[in-house]
Image (cartoon, rainbow, N blue to C red):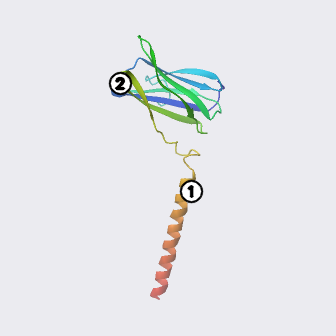
Amino acid sequence: MAEDARTIRVQAAVEHRRVPGRLVVSITESGETGHYALVDDGSVPGDIPMDGLWTAVCPIGQSRFVEVELTAMNEVGSSVLYHRVVHVPAQDEVALDFFLESTDHGLAAHRVPWLPSVGSDEYLGGEITLTLAFGWGFLVLLYVGFLVLLGRKR
């Protein structure tokens, strides 16, 4: 996997902070796979030890799509909780968040929607520009209305 400044920050919130054994995320990009252990010991920058949020930071190249596999392992064996090809936005760090819950069949992973970081190209898209345009238009309309009211009083 090409070393680059881009990363995927994979986080998994574990139900009731129960330790599932070991969590590993595999990232496949351009045919090359990297395996990264998710930890909850504070060794990953920004991680708070023992808070129930398991974290791994995985370097990626410039691909727009990567294959992600989240696996839980314990002394009995391993279980794939999530396996999908995901879109990677064009930003330096991308968040990929999960919630893990216990079911009758073992652990289940649910992808949690995330919002782009404030300041990213996706966040500052057309919606912001449109909102600002309407806001300025409204202020100009108020100003003109105020001037018209002042003109009538004279």
How crowded pointer 2 is (Cα within 10 Å; few <14, some 14-19, many 20+) is rated as some
How many neighbours does mark 1 have within 10 angstroms: few (below 14), some (14-19), or many (20 or more)? Answer: few
User: Could you tell me residue 119's position as x and y percent?
Assistant: 55, 46
Determine contact: label 1, label 2, CB under 8 Å.
no
Q: Nearer the viewer, mark 1 or mark 2?
A: 2
Across and down, in percent, residue 59 comes to: 59, 27
Q: Where's residue 115, x and y in %?
A: 49, 42
Tell me the kind of residue under disc 1. Thr
**Residue placed at 52% from the left, 24% from the top?**
69
Residue 19 placement, left or right of 114: left
**Can residue 48 be seen in this snapshot?**
no
103 and 101: which is toward the camera: 103
Res 94 quadrant in image:
top right
In the picture as drawn, the residue positioned furthest to the top comes out as 75
Per the image, the residue denoted by label 1 is 129
In this rendering, the answer to whether 2 lies above or below 78 is below
Q: Is residue 140 above or below residue 70?
A: below
**Residue that appears at 48% across and 31% down:** 46
Q: How many marks?
A: 2
Q: Residue at x 49, y 81 (%)?
A: 148
Q: Is residue 122 above or below residue 7?
A: below
Vertical placement of 139 versus 77: above or below?
Answer: below
Quadrant, the N terminus: top right
Q: Which residue sits furthest front?
A: 105
- Dot 2 corresponds to which residue? 102
Secondary structure beneath dot 1 equals helix
Q: Is residue 13 left or right of residue 10?
A: left
* Residue 151 position within the rendered picture, expressed as x and y whole percent measured from the top left: 49, 85
Element carrying mark 2 = strand
| Left or right of 20, for residue 35 | right
Of pointers 1 and 2, the one earlier in the residue sequence: 2
